[in-house]
Image: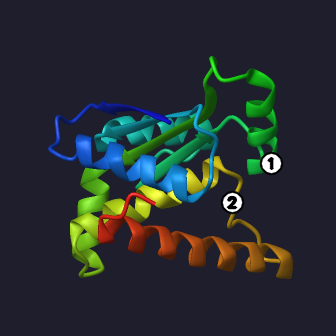
Amino acid sequence: MRVILTDEVDSRWGGMVRDWATAVLKAEEMPICTELGVHLVDSERIRQLNSEHRGIDKATDVLSFPLFATKEEAVGEADCLGEAEPLLLGDVAICLSVAEAQAEEESVDFTEELALLLAHGILHLVGYVHEGEDDESLKRADEMDQRQQGLVELILSGASA
């Protein structure tokens, strides 16, 4: 598994976030050839991305850019690639300043908030969704929340899955 990290804000979190992302991919039982990008960005960059991709002109905490609709689709693609080629899963962008503000607002440790945002973003890359108001959408959102919480606990425990 390969996590390509871009730290646009020169934070001290890069190495830790890379390790966490690898642990999440392992916990999600993604193929060894899986590759994803994680970008730690400032509020202006996340605002630009949010505006370009979602039509919302404001900063947000995390954005995901999946290349597959479902985990099964991604894993099926990996089976076709062979061992030499990476399975490009997608990208996650996290705004550290928004994460810091949210952590303070919610009275949680910044490390926990960052772990939550990373887990949330990667879950979107493997097909989890939480949009919609119908019963099925609410059920999927609950499943995502439960899985996300389990991944945050895994990350914070320092386990490598």
Q: Residue at x 76, y 80 (%)?
A: 139
Badge 1: how crowded within 10 Å, few (<14), some, or many (20+)? Answer: few
- Residue 132: image x %, image y %? 76, 69
Between 67 and 134, the residue placed more toward the observer is 67
Q: Which residue is mark 2?
A: 128
Residue 72 has which mark? 1
- Residue at image point 79% right, 73% down: 137
Determine whether, in the image, residue 1 is placed left or right of residue 124: left
Vertical arrangement, residue 7 with respect to residue 59, above or below: above
**Quick check: 29 above or below 53?**
below
Which amino acid type is shown beneath numbered disc 1? Glu
Report the Cα–Cα distance between label 2 and label 1: 12 Å
Q: Is residue 121 visible?
A: no
Quarter of image, res 143? bottom right
Three-letter amino acid code of the residue under disc 2: Tyr
Q: Position of residue 65 (x, y in %)?
A: 60, 39
Image height of 1 relative to 141, above or below: above
* Drawn side of residue 93 relative to residue 135, left or right: left
Confirm or deny contact between disc 2 and disc 1 (CB under 8 A).
Answer: no
Way the structure is coloured: rainbow
Label 2 sits on a secondary structure element that is loop
Closer-to-camera residue (141/51): 141
Nearest to the observer: residue 64 or residue 26? 26
Q: Which one is earlier in the sequence, the residue at label 2 or at label 1? A: 1
Q: Residue at x 39, y 57 (%)?
A: 160
Specify the farthest residue to the top: 84
Q: Secondary structure at mark 1?
A: helix
Residue 102 at x, y percent in the picture:
31, 68
Q: Is residue 28 left or right of residue 2?
A: right
The residue depicted at 59 percent of the width and 31 percent of the height is 33
Q: Is residue 21 above or below residue 157?
A: above
